[in-house]
Image: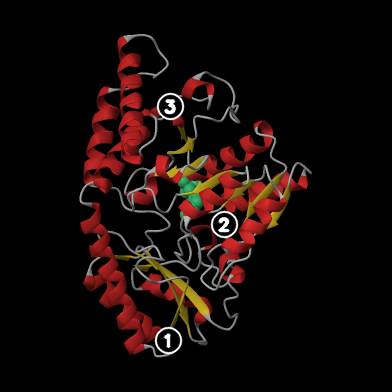
C-alpha cells in the first residue's frame, strides 16, 4: 500500500492540470516572446493565466511576476526590498522557510541589512506586541513573516501584521506558499507588499510560482537578460507550467469550503486516533481549525529507541511522511523550526500532511504502523 502523507512537501498533480498542460505542450510550443502566430498563442496563454490568477486573489494581473519557484519569489521580495526600496533592517522569525532565512542571512553577511527576530509564542506564531516594538524602532524595515509554517502549520494573523507594518511605514512580505490554493485569499484586503506562491503545493506542477508585488512599488529584476515578465524576470516563460499553475488554482478554488472541511476532518480523525492509542503523544504548533493549517500535523512522539529511523521504517511500509520540512527530510529533530519552538530534544517529531486525496484508510494504516514501530 502506498500512503502519501507528505503533501506539505509537494502534492500529486490534479488530472485536470495534467490534461491542461498536455494540451499546451502539444499545441502551444511557441516562444511567448516571438511575434509570429505560435508565439502570440503562447503569450496569450501566459496572459490569460495571469488574469485568472489575479481574479482569484483579488489583485491586478500586472502585480504578478511568474517565477521558477516559491524560493525564487521569496528571494526576489527580500533582495528587491534591499536593492530598490532602501531597506536596511529585516524583521523576520527564526522559523521562516530557508528561502527567506538564508537570503536574509546572506544579505546581512554582506552588511546590507541587520536582521531582527520577532519573539514567538508557544505555537510558533509571531508575538504581535514584540513585532510592534520592532517596527516602531525600525521604520522603513522589511517585515517577512509567513502566513503558515510548513513544518508545524501554525497560521500568522497576516491582516493584523499588515496593519502594524503600514502604521509604521514598513514593507511587508508574506510567504504564502503553504496557503495559496488552500484558503480564500484576498490580497487587496490584506494590503501586503509582497506574497510568494508555488504551484506544486496545491496539485500543480513543480518549478513554477509567482511573486505578488504591490503596484505601488518600483523594483528592478534580480534575474536579468531579457524583457520577459515586463522586464521584471528575464528568461523564456514556462508556458506549460504557468498554464498548469492557473489551472491548479482554478481547481483548488472550486468548492474550497467543502475541501477544507473534508481535509480538516481527516486531520481531526488522525489526532483522535493518535491520542487514543499513544497517550504521551503531543502536537507541535496550533492544531485548532482557526489557528493551524488543516493540511499539516506535526506529531511529537515520546522518546523511543528507534526514533532516528522511524521515517525510514515508515517508508518500508510505503508510508511517506517527513521529519521537519522537505529540505530537512530524514534528519529527525535537525529542524530549525522545531528548535525555534523549543521542541524537546529527547522526542522525535514527524510531520504528516494531508490533501483532498488522503483517505481514512490511509490514516488508519499509518497509525497502525506507527504504533507497531513505537
Ligand atoms: C513555506 C514555504 N516557502 C517556500 C517554499 C519553497 O517553495 P519551492 O519548493 O517552490 O521552492 C516552501 C516549500 O517547501 C515552503 O513550504
**Residue at the image position 60 percent from the left and 49 percent from the top:** 143
Q: Please give the name of the residue rendered at 35% of the width and 53% of the height, measured from the top-left corner.
A: 11
Image quarter of residue 242:
top left
Residue tagged 3: 62
Per the image, label 1 sits on a secondary structure element best described as loop
User: Viewed as shown, does residue 141 lie left or right of 8?
Assistant: right
Q: Does the residue labelled 2 lie within 8 Å of ligand 1?
A: yes
The Cα atoms of the two marked residues, 3 and 2, are separated by 27 Å
Looking at marks 3 and 2 on the same chain, the residue that comes earlier in the sequence is marked by 3
Can you identify the residue that label 2 sits on?
A: 96
Within-10-Å neighbours for mark 3: few <14, some 14–19, many 20+: some
Q: Mark 1 points at which residue?
A: 374
Mark 3: secondary structure: helix
Give whichever of 1, 147 is nearer the camera: 147
Percent x, y for residue 45?
Answer: 31, 25
- The mark nearer the N terminus, 2 or 1, is 2
Residue 57 shows in the view: yes
**Quadrant assignment for the N terminus:** bottom left
Q: Is residue 210 above or below residue 254?
A: above
Mark 2 vs mark 1: in front: 2
Give residue 81's quadrant in the image. top right
The label nearer to you, 3 versus 1, is 3
Q: Work out whether mark 3 precedes mark 1 in sequence or the reverse, and give the earlier one.
A: 3
Nearest to the observer: residue 210 or residue 134: 134
Amino acid at each position: 500500500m502506498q500512503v502519501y502523507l507528505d503533501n506539505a512537501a509537494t502534492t500529486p498533480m490534479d488530472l485536470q492540470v495534467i490534461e491542461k498542460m498536455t494540451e499546451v505542450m502539444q499545441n502551444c510550443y511557441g516562444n511567448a516572446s516571438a511575434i509570429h502566430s505560435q508565439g502570440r498563442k503562447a503569450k496569450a496563454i501566459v496572459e490569460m493565466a495571469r488574469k485568472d490568477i489575479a481574479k482569484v486573489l483579488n489583485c491586478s494581473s500586472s502585480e504578478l511576476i511568474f517565477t521558477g519557484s516559491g524560493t525564487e519569489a521569496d528571494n526576489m521580495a527580500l533582495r528587491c526590498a534591499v536593492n530598490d526600496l532602501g531597506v536596511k533592517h529585516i524583521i523576520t522569525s527564526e522559523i521562516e522557510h530557508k528561502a527567506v532565512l538564508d537570503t536574509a542571512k546572506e544579505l546581512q553577511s554582506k552588511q546590507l541589512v541587520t536582521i531582527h527576530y520577532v519573539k514567538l509564542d508557544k505555537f510558533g506564531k509571531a508575538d504581535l506586541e514584540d513585532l510592534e516594538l520592532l517596527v516602531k524602532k525600525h521604520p522603513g524595515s522589511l517585515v517577512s513573516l509567513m502566513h503558515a509554517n510548513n513544518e508545524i502549520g501554525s497560521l500568522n494573523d497576516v491582516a493584523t501584521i499588515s496593519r502594524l507594518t503600514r502604521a509604521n511605514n514598513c514593507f511587508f512580505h508574506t510567504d504564502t506558499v503553504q496557503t495559496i490554493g488552500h484558503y480564500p485569499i484576498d490580497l487587496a484586503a490584506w494590503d501586503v507588499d509582497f506574497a510568494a506562491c508555488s504551484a506544486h503545493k496545491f496539485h500543480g506542477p513543480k518549478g513554477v510560482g509567482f511573486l505578488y508585488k504591490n503596484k505601488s512599488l518600483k523594483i528592478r529584476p534580480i534575474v536579468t537578460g531579457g524583457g520577459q515578465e515586463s522586464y521584471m524576470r528575464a528568461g523564456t516563460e514556462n508556458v506549460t507550467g504557468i498554464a498548469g499553475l492557473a489551472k491548479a488554482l482554478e481547481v483548488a478554488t472550486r468548492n474550497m469550503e467543502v475541501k477544507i472541511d473534508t481535509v480538516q476532518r481527516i486531520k481531526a480523525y488522525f489526532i483522535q486516533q493518535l491520542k487514543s492509542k499513544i497517550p504521551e503523544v503531543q502536537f507541535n504548533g496550533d492544531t485548532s481549525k482557526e489557528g493551524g493549517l488543516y493540511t499539516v500535523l506535526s506529531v511529537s512522539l515520546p522518546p523511543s529507541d528507534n526514533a532516528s529511523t522511524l521515517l525510514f521504517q515508515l517508508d518500508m511500509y510505503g508510508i511517506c511522511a517527513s521529519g521537519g520540512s522537505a529540505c530537512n527530510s530524514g534528519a529527525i529533530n535537525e529542524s530549525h523550526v522545531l528548535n525555534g519552538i523549543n521542541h524537546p530534544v529527547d522526542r522525535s517529531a514527524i510531520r504528516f500532511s494531508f490533501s483532498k486525496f488522503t483517505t481514512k484508510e490511509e490514516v488508519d494504516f499509518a497509525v497502525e504502523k506507527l504504533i507497531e514501530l513505537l
